[in-house]
C-alpha cells in the first residue's frame, strides 16, 4: 500500500482508526462498530463506522480475527499509528526520580555492568515488558591484562576494566613457549592499554607493528596478537535481559504461548536479538520495531522500543530498550526508554544521572 493512501485518510477515518488502535492497546480485544461509535468525538451510526472499518481493512490497516465482528490493527496499521497518530507523553516526575536514583545507586559500585543491569531491571519494571541492554565490550575502558599459564599448552588471559569488571579467556600456547614470553607480552600491552578501549589498543598495535617486532622476539609478538585476538568475535557484544516473565502475562491464545517460547529461545541464544538491537545503535534517538518488520526474529508477534546511549567521548557504546507485545503502551514507553538512555549516558560521561 502506498504512503499517499495513508496520508489521504480523512479526519473521520483517522478518528475511527485511532479509537480501534487505542482499544487494542488497552485491552488486546477486537473493537466493534457500536463501541467505536460511542468513543468518537463526532456523531456516527454503527453502520457508518462499519463502512469506514471496511475501507481501513482494504488498505491493510485492520483485520478481522477469526469470525469476530470486531477489528484489530495489523502490523502495518500499528506502524501507521506510531508514525502518524501517536501522541508521545512525558516521563512522570516519580518515574524520573526513580530512574535517576537507581541508576545513581548502581553507579556507586563503579561498575558499568551494574549500571546497565539496573537500567534493564528498571525498564522491565516500569514497562511490564522485558528490559534489554546491549553493550559493546570493545568500547570498555581497560586497566590491566595478565597471562597466566594453566599448563604447557594453555594460558588464561585476564582482562580487567576500569569499571572493575574482570573477564577471562583460555588461549592455546605453542609448544615450548617460555614463561618470559607471557610476561613480556603482558608488559608490552599494559604499557599501552590503561584508559583505552580494546579497539584503540588493537589499532595502536597494528600501526606500530614494525616497532613491536623489533622490540619483542617472534613468539612474544605472537602472544600479543593472540591475546588481543582472543577478545574479538561475536561475543564482543554483551546482552542483558531482565523481566522475561512479564512476557507471559495476558496471553490469550496458544499461538501467543508458542510465540513467547520462540522469543525466550532467541533471548537465550542472543544472536538475532543483538542483530536487531544493532539496528538501533545507528539511530539518533528512539527506534520502534513492530511485529513482522522483524523478519529474522521471533519478535514477529512482538515489538521492541530501543535507544542508544553514549560514553564521555559521545561515542555510541550500546543500546537499551523494552520488548513486549505489539500492544505496548508506545506513548508512555517511548519517552521512558529515551529518558533512561540519556540518564545512562550521563552516568557513563561521569556527570551524574540527573537529566531533563
Image (tube, helix red, strand yellow):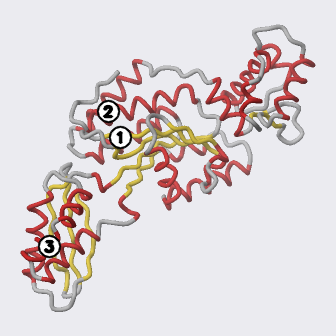
Closer to us: 131 or 74: 74
Query: Is the residue marked by circle 3 packed among few (<14), some (14-19), or many (20+) residues within 10 Å?
Result: few
Per the rendering, the mark at residue 210 is: 3
**Element assignment for label 3:** helix
Q: Secondary structure at mark 1?
A: helix
Q: Residue at coordinates 10% horizontally, 86% vertically from top-left? A: 178
Report x, y in % for residue 254. Answer: 73, 50
297 lies left or right of 49: left
Q: Residue furthest bottom?
A: 176
Near mark 2 (Cα within 10 A), the count class, few <14, some 14-19 or many ≥20, is: some
Q: Which numbered disc flags the more N-terminal residue, 3 or 2? A: 2
Answer whether labels 2 and 1 touch (C-beta < 8 Å): yes
Q: Residue at point 38% right, 56% down?
A: 237
Residue at the right extreme of this rendering: 47
Q: Quadrant of residue 261?
A: bottom right
Q: Is residue 154 above or below residue 339?
A: below
Query: Quick one: label 2 or label 1, which is nearer the N terminus?
Result: 2
Q: Quadrant of the N terminus?
A: top right
Q: How far from the left and from the top, in percent, is residue 248? A: 60, 45
> Residue 161: where, in percent of width, then height?
20, 54
Q: CA distance from mark 2 to mark 1?
A: 7 Å
Query: Which mark identifies residue 118?
Result: 1
Frontmost of labels 3 and 2 is 3
- Mark 3 or 1 closer to N-term? 1
Amino acid at each position: 500500500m502506498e504512503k499517499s493512501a495513508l496520508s489521504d485518510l480523512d479526519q473521520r477515518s483517522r478518528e475511527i482508526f485511532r479509537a480501534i488502535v487505542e482499544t487494542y492497546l488497552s485491552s488486546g480485544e477486537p473493537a466493534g462498530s457500536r463501541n467505536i461509535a460511542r468513543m468518537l468525538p463526532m456523531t456516527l451510526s454503527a453502520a457508518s463506522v462499519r463502512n469506514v472499518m471496511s475501507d481501513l481493512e482494504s488498505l491493510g490497516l485492520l483485520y478481522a480475527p477469526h469470525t469476530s465482528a470486531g477489528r484489530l490493527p495489523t502490523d502495518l496499521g500499528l506502524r501507521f499509528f506510531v508514525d502518524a497518530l501517536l501522541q508521545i507523553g512525558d516521563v512522570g516526575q516519580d518515574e524520573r526520580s526513580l530512574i535517576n536514583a537507581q541508576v545513581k545507586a548502581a553507579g556507586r559500585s563503579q561498575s558499568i555492568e551494574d549500571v546497565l543491569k539496573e537500567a534493564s531491571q528498571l525498564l522491565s519494571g516500569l514497562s511490564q515488558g522485558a528490559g534489554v541492554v546491549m553493550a559493546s565490550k570493545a568500547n570498555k575502558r581497560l586497566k590491566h591484562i595478565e597471562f597466566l599459564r594453566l599448563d604447557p599448552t594453555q594460558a588464561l588471559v585476564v582482562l580487567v576494566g576500569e569499571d572493575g569488571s574482570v573477564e577471562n579467556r583460555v588461549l592455546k600456547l605453542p609448544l615450548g613457549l617460555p614463561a618470559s614470553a607471557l610476561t613480556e607480552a603482558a608488559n608490552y600491552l599494559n604499557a599501552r592499554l590503561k584508559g583505552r578501549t580494546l579497539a584503540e589498543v588493537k589499532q595502536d598495535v597494528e600501526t606500530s607493528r614494525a616497532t613491536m617486532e623489533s622490540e619483542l622476539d617472534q613468539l612474544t609478538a605472537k602472544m600479543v596478537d593472540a591475546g588481543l585476538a582472543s577478545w574479538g568475535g561475536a561475543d564482543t557484544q554483551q546482552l542483558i535481559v531482565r523481566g522475561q516473565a512479564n512476557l507471559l502475562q495476558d496471553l490469550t491464545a496458544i499461538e501467543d504461548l508458542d510465540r513467547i517460547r520462540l522469543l525466550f529461545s532467541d533471548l537465550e541464544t542472543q544472536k538475532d536479538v543483538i542483530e536487531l538491537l544493532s539496528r538501533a545503535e545507528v539511530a539518533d534517538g528512539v527506534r520502534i520495531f513492530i511485529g513482522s518488520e522483524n523478519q529474522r526474529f521471533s519478535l514477529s508477534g512482538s515489538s521492541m522500543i530501543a535507544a542508544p546511549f553514549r560514553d564521555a567521548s559521545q561515542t555510541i557504546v550500546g543500546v537499551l530498550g523494552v520488548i513486549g507485545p505489539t500492544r505496548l503502551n508506545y506513548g508512555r514507553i517511548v519517552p521512558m526508554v529515551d529518558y533512561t538512555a540519556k540518564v545512562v549516558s550521563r552516568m557513563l560521561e561521569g556527570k551524574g544521572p540527573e537529566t531533563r
